[in-house]
Amino acid sequence: MSAVPQLPLFPPPAVPLRFADGDRYEWPRSEDVWARTRGWWVPSLAGDSRDDGTGWWSDAEISASLHRATAAEDATKRFVPALPGDRLPGRPIRALPPAVDRTAQYVLDHQANRLVPIRELVAAYDEDAAHDIPGVLTAMETARVLSRIDAEHDPVRVQYDEDAGRIYARYQRPSDFGVWTDAGFPPVVTCLHVFVLAGSPAKAA
């Protein structure tokens, strides 16, 4: 049984400005997976980040392939940012860094334990509403979303990892249950938003 989830509804929202070890580039239809390890993309089996021996890809090659998929609105490709550990990388910020121009917003899918574009998570519950969610946010829109998160939750941890080109926002909220249930659901849920800095908009040839 494949460890790669079903095909995404939308194409990759944007080509990341930078990559980080632990990122994944997946082709769910063929179950091909590339996992970034020590600066190189290792072709791997689905759900397995070990090198399968067929050669490595560079950041430039992955970026070009993602650019083609984004420009062609190819929903058979998927970029999966690496999950941070318990300690968020980067430095705390209170305002959006000047270097931030455009971002693609990813959120933690608790069931799959992976980051997904926010519109993909919304589509699992309301496909029509997901089509109204932009794949890419401007700097002003990103700041507005972060401000809303900060206003609605306390405490919120926001960190900027310049090397990876990512802004992380993590907070806890009460679960829908409020207490531990027989099914094991906790009284609080840890939420994570990751704003991946995006490169120039892709244009179809």
Image (spheres, helix red, strand yellow):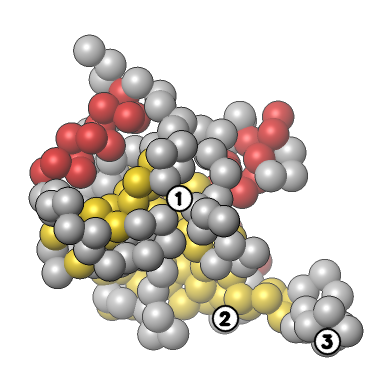
Query: Is 62 positioned to the left or the right of 140 in the image?
Result: left
Q: Which residue is mark 3?
A: 180
Q: Are marks 2 and 3 in contact (CB under 8 Å)?
A: no
Taking the spot 53% from the left edge, 39% from the top edge, the residue there is 8
Q: Residues within 10 Å of mark 1 (few under 14, many from 20)?
A: many
Question: For mark 1, what is the residue?
Answer: 105
Give residue 5's mark: none
Residue 142 point in image, percent of width and height: 43, 50
Q: Name the residue located 27 percent from the left edge and 47 percent from the top edge.
A: 16
Q: Regarding mark 1 in the picture, which secondary structure is present there?
A: strand
Label 3: few (<14), some or many (≥20) within 10 Å?
A: few
Alpha-carbon span between mark 2 and mark 1: 20 Å
Depth check: give the residue in front, 6 or 118: 6
- Based on the displayed image, in which of its 4 quarters is residue 137 positioned? top left
Q: Nearer the viewer, residue 36 or 13?
A: 36
Alpha carbons under labels 2 and 3: distance apart: 22 Å
The residue identified by callout 2 is 155
The residue sitting at 57% across, 44% down in the picture is 6
